[in-house]
Amino acid sequence: MTAKKDTSPAEEIKTLRDQLNQWAHEYYVLDDPSVPDSEYDRAFQQLQALEEAHPDLVTANSPTKRVGGKPLEKFDEVKHQVPMLSLQTLTDEDQFSAFDSRIAKQLNRKSNNLSLFDSESVEIEYCCELKFDGLAISLLYENGQLVRAATRGDGEVGEDVTANAMTIRSIPLELLGKGWPRTLEVRGEVCVTKHEFEKLNKKRADADERPFANPRNLAAGSMRQLDSKLAAQRPLVFFCYGIGHIEGGRVSDRQRTRLSHLQDWGFRVAKEVKTAKGTAGCLAYFHDIGEKRDRLPYEIDGVVFKVNSIEFQDMLGFRAREPAWAVALKYPPSEEITVLNEVDWQVGRTGALTPVAKLEPVQVGGVTVSNATLHNIDEIRRLDIRVGDSVVIYRAGDVIPKVVRTVPERRPKDAGEINLPTECPVCGSEILRADDGVVARCTGGLICGAQQREAIKHFASRRAMDIDGLGDKLVDALVDQELIETVADLYRLKAEDVAGLERMGEKSAANLIEALEASKKTPLSRFLFALGILQIGEETAKALAEAFGELDSIRNAPLLLFLQVPDVGGEVAKAIAAFFAEEHNEKVIDGLLNAGVEPQSNGTPSRRFVDTLTLANFLSSAKTLGMPLSGVGTKTLETLGRHYRHLDALLKAVDKGEDDSGVKAGTLEKLAEGLKADDWRKTLKDAQAYADKLAKKAPAGGADERPLEGETWVLTGTLARLTRDQAQQHLEALGAKVSGSVSGKTARVVAGESAGSKLDKARSLDVDVIDEEEFIGFLAEHGIKLED
Ligand code: IVH
């Protein structure tokens, strides 16, 4: 809705706020939005703009305040006007029956004088509610405006969490409707849906952050967050279940009706709330909700029965810290303790390994649980879980139960440490773990049974080998019929084998064989991508193909060489090397080549790549990979590299203990030490030998082919022996950038005849200037001869 032109800003703001509050109510409380999000966003932005233009009209409870404010130093204390009590909890149905009889008796006795009942057999009416498993809070409204939110604390004194509560969209900042008392304290529970809980935990696990143990912890942790901007990002919901203190007005004398009024005033009330009479009615409710419990979007740990009549409640009064008129009847707990017998490692479709806890079977929330997830090895370490430990299992709804913590007091002496397997439990290939990621993966992508189908689907996909007609379903069928096991088997398929499959005819079988044939001459980069090497996306595959120029060179290259490929870091290099080191993978590749697959490539390594295979680069890569060279910095390694140029020369110097490169004394001793450790001498020698071999294959061009890489040159004035364009081309061929203006970053200025302001500027900035003669000499030094 758009405010009319002739209204004042104050009126416009009021209209927008009311509209936004109404829409938020429909969306967050009623789950029934009447306008699309875009409409809400537009009005919200309109209000934001108006408030910015009229700061005097900004109020504390504007919908624009929902995003959180400045972080607090600490929470202030809040004394509750009416203490926030707890509930007596019952765990079986007989206990409830006894409770109900006692209430009936007491009311009968107490009401004799008032003659409310004429017999003891009358059934008491209860308001039946869900017992949400979240965090209890109290909300104080003055004249319909939210003025304060507080946690329950010890029941007497809680913490002021107003800023956080304001970010919860299902908490009205202004009450809707009418008839509310001047002062109204609303009580209820801050919760989070099971779905949002799982989602957030997954995100946290991916970001290597500690997951929350259960939705209650998430709700509590979020409400006790000093930075309300962070709380605003948590998917919290407020369900109200009662009224605390009131002044200046009256509320209904029935709990059920009170909840309806609260709903009218803008609060969310569980739609499962209803009234029931006597033990039979209440237990039927208990069973009904128990049956639905797993499907409810929120975690509940029981139901609450409250005597519906407030007058009766007052008569019954309180006992110690609990009201005598209400009781919680709990469902079997969703957490239970049992013993961890063993850990199984399961391999997922992408090769990711997940630890699965094998448990002593235990009932959790009415279901027998014998398996639970342990997330990943880091989580196991963080929780310090060992085989034989007593562990707490948590189960929410239909999601996979999980191990949330151990019970250290019960740890047996022989509790065994849990380790990541070194070999894939399915195929025996090496397990690789990215240091920056928590996921451990099997490297047997092409042969691992667990990954087989995914590997083949990926291989055939459009961006990989692009095998027309070989979709996911067909791959499944081919594997099911045992016609293929690996991607190499694809090229041994015969039309008649395929034609026999369901929903395949002769024509489509022939088409498939043709598509397979056509895919044989795919570019090397696509072939590499199709192999599904961990961490290797299309870009890295291209870079590899471009650098090495042929498959064979890649297959045999040592790790240190992969590290010189643009954008390939330690993890990626390790993944590539591990893939080709795996014999099974090699077999599949041989199978592909033998079946006629012929990846297309240059056939020679690129000059640019070969030029990066320098001694300095090898040394610094070795250091990154862990060669012990502490105290020897990159600069020193560069100096050594430039001076000795070849590993053989450096090794000779190291072995003799004579250094003439000018680096700090003692450096060569440190190098000698480093070379001894973990066979680094051999690793470097292998890399140098491989680099030498590639250098011979690479197209001609000196090692200094692009000596001006990274430099910016400026051409000015008139050149006699070559045009500006030619000069620019030569400079660019040497790696320089040519710019039109001089700055402090300019490497050199070539000044021809009658050079003007650029030359002056170069001089004033102390930039190196050469004339045409010197320039031609420079080009000649770099192998560029000008025609006469
Ligand atoms: S009534 C005076 N109703 O359970 C009665 N409590 O053990 C006090 N809870 O701290 C609360 N759902 O956080 C009530 N429908 C419900 C509830 C509920 C959850 C929580 C509440 C309270 C605890 C009492």
Image: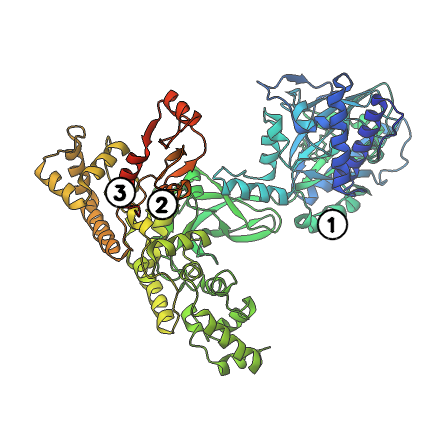
| Residue 310 higher or lower than 727, as above or below | above
Q: Secondary structure at mark 3?
A: helix
Image location of residue 138, percent across then percent down: 71, 25
Height in image: 172 above or below 356? above
On whether ligand 1 comes within 8 Å of the CB at mark 3, the answer is: no
Q: Secondary structure at mark 2?
A: helix
Residue 311 falls in which quadrant of the image? top right
Q: Position of residue 624 (x, y in %)?
A: 30, 40
Q: Which residue is mark 2?
A: 733
Q: Residue at x 18, y 28 (%)?
A: 664
- Amino acid of disc 2: Ala
Q: Earlier in the sequence, mark 2 or mark 1?
A: 1
Check disc 3 and report the residue beneath it: 780
* Numbered badge on residue 288: 1
Contact between marks 3 and 2 (CB within 8 A): the answer is no
Q: Under 8 Å from ligand 1: the CB of mark 1?
A: no
Which residue is at 67% across, 17% downward?
Answer: 78
Res 241 label:
none
Pointer 3 or 1: first along the chain: 1
**162 is higher (above) or lower (below) than 580:** above
| Snapshot quadrant of residue 16 | top right
Q: Is residue 254 among what the camera can see?
A: yes
Q: Residues within 10 Å of mark 3 (few under 14, many from 20)?
A: few
Task: In this rendered view, identify the residue nearer to me: 358 or 637.
Answer: 637
Specify whether 705 is left or right of 323: left
Whether the residues at callouts 3 and 1 have beta carbons within 8 Å, the answer is no
Q: Amino acid at mark 3?
A: Ala
Return the x and y of residue 711 as percentages of the image width and height.
36, 35
Q: Amino acid at mark 1?
A: Asp
Mark 3 vs mark 2, foreground winner is 3
How far, Cα to Cα, is label 3 from label 2? 13 Å
Tally of numbered tags:
3
